Amino acid sequence: MGNRLSKIYTRTGDDGTTGLADGSRTEKDSLRMEAIGTVDELNSAIGMTLSHDTPNEITLCLTRVQHDLFDLGGELAIPSYVTIKTELTQALENQLDKLNNNLPYLKEFILPAGGKSTSCCHLARCICRRAERRCVSLNREETLNPAILTYLNRLSDLLFVISRVLARHEGGEEVLWKREKLQD
């Protein structure tokens, strides 16, 4: 394979459009580009999580997810191309179950807080939910591979569980939500 990015700027996007991988052009603020951009942002947030101390099992899991997300972004960039399969969601579910089995039962909601890796993972979970919403919006206009929506939904669950694992790894405690009465 030759040099894919031999020139970084092309000036072709100066008019507010961008090229998709199939050669077609679309507005930079189209639903498709919003979905692609949010998946890219999610991948970056996972990279931020990995830049902190994480257990080897989490590092391997999230690195695999980053590769999956790159494929998912590619699928979004090439209309009618399919790369995300249901097996990827099953792998997330297997990892989620394995990690969740070692955690105490949750009786209250937890706040998205904690140490550096925990907080980054909570942020990634929130971005994942937004990526899912962007893909749902796009799916209303153009039918997407249903495995994309399922994958993102399950990934946000996995990121929540990983946040709980990371809170323990960092030696911290989860911050439980407490309903406080408003003062008059």
Image (cartoon, helix red, strand yellow):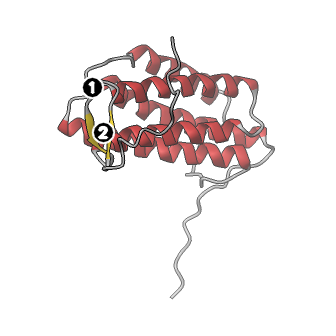
Residue where numbered disc 1 is placed: 79
Neighbour tally class for label 1: few under 14, some 14-19, many 20 plus, Cα within 10 Å = some
Does the residue at mark 1 contact the one at mark 2 (Cβ under 8 Å)? yes
Q: Residue furthest bottom?
A: 184
The spot of residue 157 in percent (x, y) is 50, 35
Viewer-nearest residue: 172 or 3: 3
User: Residue at left 50%, top 88%?
Assistant: 184
Separation of disc 1 and disc 2 at Cα? 10 Å
Q: In this image, 168 relative to 23: left or right?
A: right
User: Residue at left 39%, top 16%?
Assistant: 85
The image quarter containing residue 78 is top left
User: Residue at left 55%, top 43%?
Assistant: 124
Q: Residue furthest left?
A: 141
Per the image, label 2 sits on a secondary structure element best described as helix
Is residue 104 visible in this depiction of the protein? no
The spot of residue 23 in percent (x, y) is 29, 27
Count every numbered label the image shows and give the total.
2
Residue where numbered disc 2 is placed: 32
Q: Amino acid at mark 1?
A: Pro
The spot of residue 180 in percent (x, y) is 56, 71
User: Residue at left 51%, top 36%?
Assistant: 8
